[in-house]
Image (tube, rainbow, N blue to C red):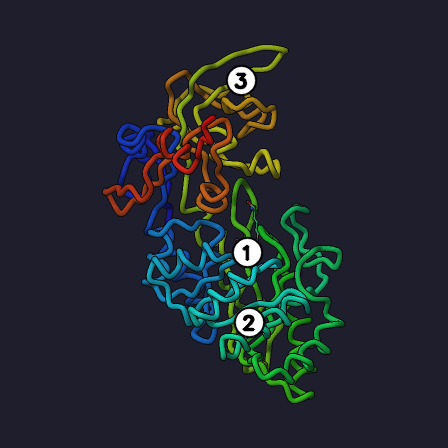
Amino acid sequence: MNTFHYRDHTLYAEDLPLQEIAEHYGTPCYVYSEAALRERYRAFSAALGARTQVCYAVKANSNLSILRTFAEMGAGFDIVSGGELARVLRAGGDVGKIVFSGVGKSSAEIRAALDAGLSCLNVESAAELWRIADIAADLGKRAPIALRVNPDVDPGTHRYIATGLKESKFGIPMDQARDLYLQAAQHPALEIKGIACHIGSQLLDLAPLGEAATRVRGLYTDLATSGIVLEHLDLGGGVGIRYHDETPPNPADYAWTLNQALQGVSARRVVELGRALVGNAGVLLTKVEYLKAQGGKSFCVVDAAMNDLLRPALYEAWHDILPLRQSAETGHAMDIVGPICESGDYFAKNRPIVAQAGDLLAIMSTGAYGFVMSSNYNSRPRPPEVLVRGHRHHLVRRRETFEDQWALEEEPGH
Ligand code: LLP
């Protein structure tokens, strides 16, 4: 499905011209396509089959309407904080299908997770395991746990989003995991459910995912011979998407890779997909404020900034940038930059584009790690989020006001 496409030189989201949204809500503004979300979820869950629970990685985009859409489709959820737990519950997510990842779960978060009765805590260290055991014992419960192992596989992605290398802060080294499982099995307040791993994000090559799954299978088999039979294997997320000209894995090849690596393993499977489900379902609309030329360069200054979309500034990430109205003219190479007082505040460098002040642009593939990483830097109100359904638009988060920004502040007086 071509969610964002040109009809008569006008960029549409589903059956709605994006121009209408820009005029109605102003810019900058995030726009999501519900059909795209549904299509991606369906494609992955169909390819992976009934024995795999697709858990949506909430961190990619935690808007309640998006969570509700996935909840309605039967998704589980991968959360990393008490805030994400509260959001999933608020959006009607099934608590029995929530897995809780993250290296630094606080006691309050662990307690909230056990109180809610979620399906599994993915434990990232021995210290965390014993903290969970103490809290569960205190609550008179058994905590469902998986150890998140660090398979030491290089996923070949940006170093900030590679998580499965042995020098990274994530997970428990493979060679320590077995002993820790044996100790956990002795603890009355712990219920061993599975193994978890996650090696990184925006993975374009399936081989490292297959390699990690093979290593997880090795541990699964090893534990079975020690009498520890696991109910599920959680293979994490990380499936990449096309931002520019990449060829990302398709759902069928992804499923095939996992099936190959896990042949003969009867345990259920869990995956924690974020970007692959929402990344290409969203765009950020922005308006050109000014054109300027200096130092031998041309700049196109737009009204969105790094506070709205941090990925280019943080990872030098590429996002395609399309005009809402296509032009027959040839583009002129410009840096597309925001109004924030930092040189890192840019969306594209030397990008050929046809643009005049007042023109509207769409920064593509911003459904994942877009709004969720936004801030109020430079006291800029965060943008609204709009969900498109066919030819209709629905505001799913309003634009912040200036008052919203200081609503939590107190002045001590004299
Ligand atoms: N599970 C765990 C344990 C994770 O740490 C992550 C992402 C996921 C699942 C979901 O990964 P995905 O399927 O979305 O690749 N802000 C960065 C991405 C950070 C990813 C962090 N962990 C970006 O904008 O590229």
Q: Position of residue 78 (x, y in %)?
A: 49, 61
- Measure the C-alpha gap from mark 2 to mark 3: 56 Å
Whether the residue under disc 1 has CB within 8 Å of ligand 1: yes
- Indicate left or right for 83 with 4 as reference: right
- Tell me which residue sits at (37%, 56%) in the image: 67
- Indicate left or right for 174 with 97 as reference: right
Say few, some or many: other residues with alpha carbon within 10 Å of mark 2 (under 14 / 14 to 19 / 20 or more): some
The residue identified by callout 2 is 135
Q: Position of residue 346 (x, y in %)?
A: 55, 27
Specify the quadrant of the image occupied by residue 359.
Answer: top left
Q: Is residue 2 above or below residue 199?
A: above
Q: Position of residue 12 (x, y in %)?
A: 32, 37
Outermost residue, front side: 414
The residue identified by callout 3 is 299
Of the numbered discs in the image, which one, if any, rests on residue 144? none
- Tell me which residue sits at (55%, 77%) in the image: 137
Which circle, 1 or 2, is nearer the viewer?
A: 2
Specify the quadrant of the image occupied by residue 166.
Answer: bottom right
Q: What amino acid is found at the position of numbered circle 2 in the picture?
A: Ile
Q: What amino acid is found at the position of numbered circle 1 in the picture?
A: Val
Callout 2 touching callout 3 (CB < 8 Å):
no
Q: What amino acid is found at the position of numbered circle 3 in the picture?
A: Phe
Say few, some or many: other residues with alpha carbon within 10 Å of mark 1 (under 14 / 14 to 19 / 20 or more): many
Q: Secondary structure at mark 3?
A: strand
One can see residue 253 in this view: no
- Indicate left or right for 104 with 111 as reference: right
Q: Position of residue 6 (x, y in %)?
A: 35, 35
The residue identified by callout 1 is 239
Specify the quadrant of the image occupied by residue 38.
Answer: bottom left
Q: Secondary structure at mark 1?
A: loop
- Tell me which residue sits at (43%, 74%) in the image: 50
Outermost residue, left side: 392
